[in-house]
Amino acid sequence: MSEAKIRLSLYQALPQGSKFDLVLELAGSYGAANVVPIITEKSLFKMPNRDISGKYSRWQKILEAQSKQTGRATVTELLPICDLANLAKAELDHDLMIFGHFSPEAASLRNYLAEHKERINESASLSMGLFVGPESGFTQAEAELLKKLGATEVSFGPRVLRSELAASFVLASLTYLELI
């Protein structure tokens, strides 16, 4: 099995209910390096006042099962839940960063990858941060914050995708191109 050209970190706005389980199944199957659950202004998921270690344990088991099922040598790492505003204070060290956004200025994912194809192919190991917002998308302020961090807004095609499927769309696209 060859090494991935891109080490992908998925920053996924936490959806309500069991939808995050699907995100983890897909991220683990496609080969994301890690998943960072994020809370945004429009997130429906609210941090409970109780201990959520049980949820984390279940989520980690999902990632381990996906690694085993798909024959991956490594397990996708699950990082702690982070507020998007606090995440901005951390130094994100990615060569490429993208976020899905409902904007006419958003580049298509296809064009973005074509624009960076040479850089991707020449690098032995490239790191990419993929930010996926909640069902209603990132607020304009959050989009501006992501841009300040160096992320490029991209479109995932002509249709509005559910939050849990947007990550899958990008992961499948990168897998098809044999980048992850």
Image (cartoon, rainbow, N blue to C red):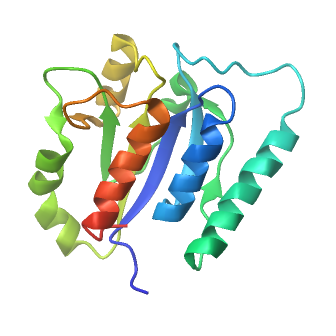
- Report if residue 72 is visible in the image: no
Image coordinates for residue 155, horizontal then vertical, percent = 23, 34
Say which quarter of the image contains residue 44: top right
User: Residue at image x 18%, y 53%?
Assistant: 113
Say left or right for 166 vs 121: right
Say left or right for 107 vs 26: left
- The image shows residue 72, relative to residue 113, as above or below, that is below
Say left or right for 71 vs 105: right
Image coordinates for residue 40, horizontal then vertical, percent = 53, 20
Quarter of the C terminus within the rendering: bottom left
Of the pair 66 and 131, the residue shown nearer to us: 66
Of the pair 88 and 165, the residue shown nearer to us: 165
Quarter of the N terminus within the rendering: bottom left
User: Residue at image x 47%, y 52%?
Assistant: 9
Q: Residue furthest front?
A: 159
- Report if residue 55 is visible in the image: yes
User: Residue at image x 48%, y 47%?
Assistant: 10
Of the pair 96 and 136, the residue shown nearer to us: 136
User: Residue at image x 86%, y 41%?
Assistant: 53
Image coordinates for residue 85, horizontal then vertical, percent = 52, 22
- The image shows residue 180, relative to residue 78, as above or below, that is below
Q: Residue furthest bottom?
A: 1
Say left or right for 50 vs 79: right
